[in-house]
Amino acid sequence: MNPTLLIVDDDEEIRTQMKWGLAQDYEIVQAFDRNSAIEKFRVHKPLVVLLDLGLPPHPNTPEEGLAALRELLEIDPKTKVVIASGQGERENTLQAVGSGAYDFLTKPVDMDELLLLLKRCFHVAQLEREFFEMKRQYNDDTFEGMLGTSKPIQAVFDSIRKVATSDAPVMILGDSGTGKEMAARAIHQRSARSAQPFVAINCSAIPEALLESELFGHEKGSFTGAHAQKKGKIEQATGGTLFLDEIGDVPLQVQVKLLRFLQEGYIERVGGNDMIQVNARVVAATNADLKKGMAEGTFREDFFYRLAVVEFNLPPLRDREGDIELIANALLQRFAKENNKPGLSLGSKTATAMIRHNWPGNVRELQNRLRRAVIMSEGKTISPDDMELSLASQAHVGKSLKEAREDLERQMVLDALRKHSNKITSAATELGISRPNFYELMKKLGINR
Ligand SMILES: Nc1ncnc2c1ncn2[C@@H]1O[C@H](COP(=O)(O)OP(=O)(O)OP(=O)(O)O)[C@@H](O)[C@H]1O
Ligand SMILES: [Mg+2]
């Protein structure tokens, strides 16, 4: 279908002449004054408008044309408006260009010139549209730097959006490398506290004896080595967000003090007597099983319920359909650039190997394998070997023969479907079985097209 062009001119003869010259390349829509122009514009959404400035009821002044120009651009600023003006209207034309018109022509219009100009306008308009579409998609893929379009990760983004507007403590659960710290930063970034500090403390990396003073600070001389007064992480997070990473490793007596801070909003430095009021939002994370900790008495229940007013789970990478490739491609761009190896891409077998891999270390593991692969790769594509991924799955260990057989069948059916864009006949041929048998197999394995 030809692209749509709106021609606005009060002179019917001119419109007819133009239509005659342009109808072969464009879908022509006509208007004779400002109101009809806007109406037609809204209905037909043309990328390009050819506009005469002298429109009724003031055909001898440019005001109606200029007003139409402004209105059109207000409806869609990307519209390319070309002004067709009479001789001696140079000043008006310049004014129109100053107001956002894309280009101009002088009447009487030379058809060849007009055709060339229109071609260029449509080309630019089309490119712009594609660019905005890409940008929109890109923005939808990332959330505060977190990539993912899969349902489970989008649900996490939704949770983050919701909790960001409140000050309630949040507990982020998830296996190692799933993005817990990134999620905590996203909560901070999206909150009204974003201009204030985000202070992270890894509770498992600090020796027990020092953790309390790290968190709460200390007064001078409160213990050997406390040469000066020091503010703790909690105070440093004033106005902002305190991120307690690996909260499962906090010893019981520090849990009690943190609980008091959560309940009352006050802290006491080690060796100090003053109660200091601190306004900091607490976000905690762990990959430990806190329920088990509570059952065994290493994690206080009251502390848990204070912390986990809101709780959400970062899903394992293997459960985020489509995200592995998305994240891998984004990281590949970055690492290729860092290592001066432009033009690297993932080989087709690599995508399959990645989907089959179990990713116990989640996004961090993907990052590490890719970083290494980019350094090791010799060609233009990253092979499964470069990533130290095997195409054969190790997943059968510990399974019954029946389970292992079904796993393999499922893999082969899915691979064949993917390879043949879900065409059953071709997929069945590839596996050397009949169409009905292929359907039966899909049914048995619970595979939908
Ligand atoms: N959705 C994602 N998109 C892009 N990068 C991600 C995503 N999730 C995590 N990452 C990256 O993966 C790495 C691990 O993320 P992060 O440190 O937030 O995970 P974690 O759950 O805190 O891990 P750990 O349990 O090891 O502390 C980081 O480098 C982070 O930038
Ligand atoms: Mg972490």
Image: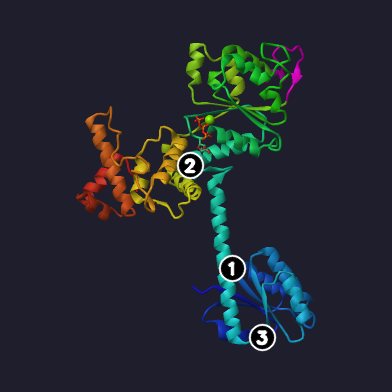
Q: Name the residue under label 3.
A: 12
Q: How far apart are marks 1 and 2 (CA)?
A: 34 Å
- Vertical comparison of 426 with 176: above or below: below
Q: Say which of 56 and 63 sits in front.
A: 63
Q: In which quarter of the image is residue 266?
A: top right
Secondary structure beneath disc 1?
Answer: helix
Type of the residue with mark 1: Ala
Q: Please state if 102 lies on the left or on the right of 4 as rendered.
A: right
Secondary structure beneath disc 3?
Answer: helix
Q: Which badge, 1 or 2, is on the more N-terminal residue?
A: 1
Q: What stretch is highlighted in magenta?
A: 262-278
Q: Say which of 88 and 222 sits in front.
A: 222
Q: Which badge, 2 or 3, is on the more N-terminal residue?
A: 3
* Nearer the camera: disc 2 or disc 3: 2
Mark 1 C-beta to ligand 1 under 8 Å: no
Q: Say which of 218 and 103 sits in front.
A: 218
Type of the residue with mark 2: Lys
- Vertical comparison of 272 with 24: above or below: above
Residue 125 image label: 1
Residue at image coords 73%, 85%: 86
* Nearer the camera: disc 1 or disc 2: 1
